[in-house]
Amino acid sequence: MKRKLGMITTLAIGAILTGCSGNEAASSEKEGLLSDGVLTVGVTAGPHEDIVNEVKKLAAEDGFEIEVVSFTDFVKPNTALEEGELDINSFQTGIFLDSVVAESGYELTKAEPTITIPMGIYSEAYQDISDIKEGDTIGIPNSPTQEGRALQLFEEAGLITLPEGSGVEVIISDIVENPLNLTFLTSEAAQLPSQLQDLGAAGINSNYVLDAEMDPEEYGLLMENVDDLVQANYVVSRTENKDDEALAQFIDYYKTDEIKQFIEKEFKGAVVPSW
C-alpha cells in the first residue's frame, strides 16, 4: 500500500413476479401493486448498477425477472419513481432521500438498507493526512448532504472545526476554525477524481474513485467509519407500495450470501454490505 489509509448505460425496465420457485426469496402467491409482471428498478451507473445486475441474475433463476434503468445523475431516479416510471430505486443514502422528500414533497419511503459507499479523503500530492499544507485547495462534492459529509470528514482529520452538533447539512460557510487557511471548492462529485492533480486533497465517495480506475488504498488518506447505518444506501419505493410483496422479494434476493460475496470480491472494501 503506497499511502497510509486511515479508518458511485444499462437500460432495463422490469421484474417478473410470477413463476417463482425453489428459493425462499421468490413467491408468486400475492398480486401486489408492483406484481404486474414488471418491476422497474432505477440505479445510478457504477456499483449500484453492477450489484442490481447481479441481483437480476440471481432472481432470474426463479423466474423473477428484473430489468434496470441506469441514470447518470441523482435527481432523475427519484423523479422517475415519484412519477411512476420506476417501481423502486436503489442508489441513494437515507439522508439524501430525506432531503429530497423535504424539498420536493415526494411520497417516497426507505425500504431497506443495502450498502455503504464510504467517503474518503484522497490525494495525489500527499501520502498522509498530516502532509496537507497551509493554503491548500480542497475539493468536496456540491450535492446536498455530501458537502456536509465531506466537511465532517475533514473535521475528523483535525483540519477544520465545525459548529458543535452540526450534521450533514453543514456547509463551507459554517466552518468555525480553519487553522491552515484551506480553500474549499465544491464540484460535481464524479469530477473530483480527475481534479485531484490540481488539489491538495478532496473528499470523494469511493464509487467515483473506482469509476476513475484509482485504487482507494493507494490514494486514500482517511476513510469514513461504516460501522453504523448513518451513510447507508437504501432501496426506495413510493410510500403506497412500501408493503408490496414484489419489493420484499427484491430485497430478499439482494440481501443474500451470493450478493454479499459478489460485493466483497468486486469492490474490495470500497463498497460495504449492510448485512
Image: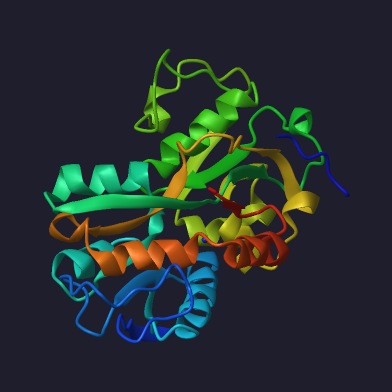
* Residue farthest to the top, as pictured: 164
The one nearer the camera, 120 or 78, is: 78
Residue at left offset 22%, top offset 72%: 30
The one nearer the camera, 251 or 83, is: 251
Residue at left offset 57%, top offset 59%: 207
**Percent x, y of residue 105:** 11, 49
In the image, residue 164 above or below residue 158: above
Residue at left offset 32%, top offset 84%: 16
Q: Is residue 76 visible?
A: no
Left or right, residue 203 beside residue 165: right
Left or right, residue 74 beside residue 256: left
In the image, residue 128 above or below residue 26: above
The one nearer the camera, 150 or 93, is: 93
**Percent x, y of residue 223:** 65, 39
Q: Is residue 164 visible?
A: yes
**Percent x, y of residue 133:** 72, 30
**Percent x, y of residue 137:** 60, 40
In the image, residue 263 above or below residue 94: below
Residue at left offset 52%, top offset 82%: 57
Colour pattern: rainbow
Left or right, residue 108 beside residue 64: left
Total numbered circles: 0
Residue 78 lies in quadrant: bottom left
Residue 3 lies in quadrant: top right
Left or right, residue 210 beside residue 130: left
